[in-house]
Amino acid sequence: MSLHDGAASVSLRATREARAVMKPARLSEHSEANNKMLDGDRAVHNWYRFVLSFPPHLVRTYLWRFRAGRTHTVLDPFCGAGTTIVECKKLGIRAVGIEAHLMSHFAAEAKVDWNPRCNGLLRHAPKIATAAKTQLRREGLAETGMAAQQAVLSGRRKLKTLPPGEMKLLLKNSISPLPLHRALVLLKHMRNAPGKKYKGHELLAFAKIIVSSASNLHFVPEVGVRSPKADAEVVAPWFAEARAHARAESDVCVKEAVPA
Ligand SMILES: C[S@@+](CC[C@H](N)C(=O)[O-])C[C@H]1O[C@@H](n2cnc3c(N)ncnc32)[C@H](O)[C@@H]1O
């Protein structure tokens, strides 16, 4: 069945009461803006996206055309980082996603984990950030100022790195030594932190900032490596991202969120 078959011909006919999706604003047919995420859609969707993820408003348009509602269950058998299932959950429509790629699966799973515990995350993440910052400061590798770069250039500081087998999995120069060191320090403190409740959110925030700002990767849309940065912050943007999860959760958390 094609998505263009028309709502009337498919079995997803909902009663008026059960319909969960508002009629979407009409977008011009061939505008590039159609492929971009709308500002109002950023909560949750923006926790982790691929360049080629389709925009949430497109999912909404099809849900509306199919008359999908609260009495239905949507199946996305190739759900990627979860655009469809997240949008369904936001709209109160049950959804099931299947995804083979481990990273995409992890992202989608964390993005539909909305247990109302935003305040807990807001207490947990600062402890990790403080422990990581304290260690970096003690090592002379604080994220602010030039001292870290000078310490590395002078050879006074040996940086952590990945074992050779794991290093080989990374694209060459995709992350510079100083940000990699900071990432490994942060990861250690995340792993050592007591309680596993927030792990999914904290790891997804980590993945997002590593790919989007701490690394030398860029997407055009194919993945590539730009000239290596001498340095990049890791702990500060990670903490900002973890806080954004908590804030988005408090926006979308509803007592009886539908399962996804
Ligand atoms: C185009 S992406 C989906 C993107 C998603 N709709 C979004 O906007 O985030 C297609 C996904 O299908 C997954 N995939 C491909 N073959 C699969 C299979 N046999 N079983 C499960 N997932 C598969 C890929 O890993 C990829 O993430």
Image (spheres, grey):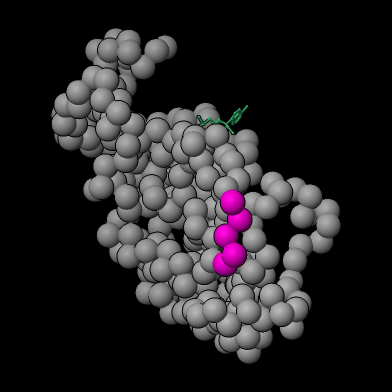
Q: Quadrant of residue 132?
A: bottom right
Q: Is residue 134 left or right of residue 253?
A: right
**Residue 98: image x %, image y %?**
55, 35
Instruction: For ligand 1, give the image quadrant.
Output: top right
> What residue is rendered at 58% in x and 82% in y?
147
> What residue is rendered at 46% in x and 67% in y?
237
Is residue 210 found inside the magenta-colored segment of the image?
A: no
Which sits in the foreground, 109 or 94?
109
**Residue 168: image x %, image y %?**
79, 50
Q: Does residue 107 appear in the picture of this structure?
A: yes
Against 27, residue 176 (above or below) is below
Is residue 230 found inside the magenta-colored segment of the image?
A: yes
Q: Is residue 210 left or right of residue 122?
A: right
Q: Is residue 244 left or right of residue 139?
A: left
Q: Quadrant of residue 179?
A: bottom right
Which sits in the foreground, 209 or 174?
174
Against 106, residue 55 (above or below) is above
Against 87, residue 68 (above or below) is above
The quadrant of the rendering that contains the N terminus is top left
**Residue 36: image x %, image y %?**
32, 37
Which sits in the foreground, 214 or 3?
214
Which sits in the foreground, 202 or 140?
140
**Residue 215: image x %, image y %?**
57, 56
The quadrant of the rendering that contains the C terminus is top left
Instruction: Give the residue at the far bottom of this rendering.
Output: 138
Magenta-tinted stretch: 227-231
Secondary structure mostly taken by the magenta-highlighted segment of the chain: loop
Against 135, residue 260 (above or below) is above
> What residue is rendered at 40% in x and 62% in y?
245
> What residue is rendered at 26% in x and 25% in y?
31
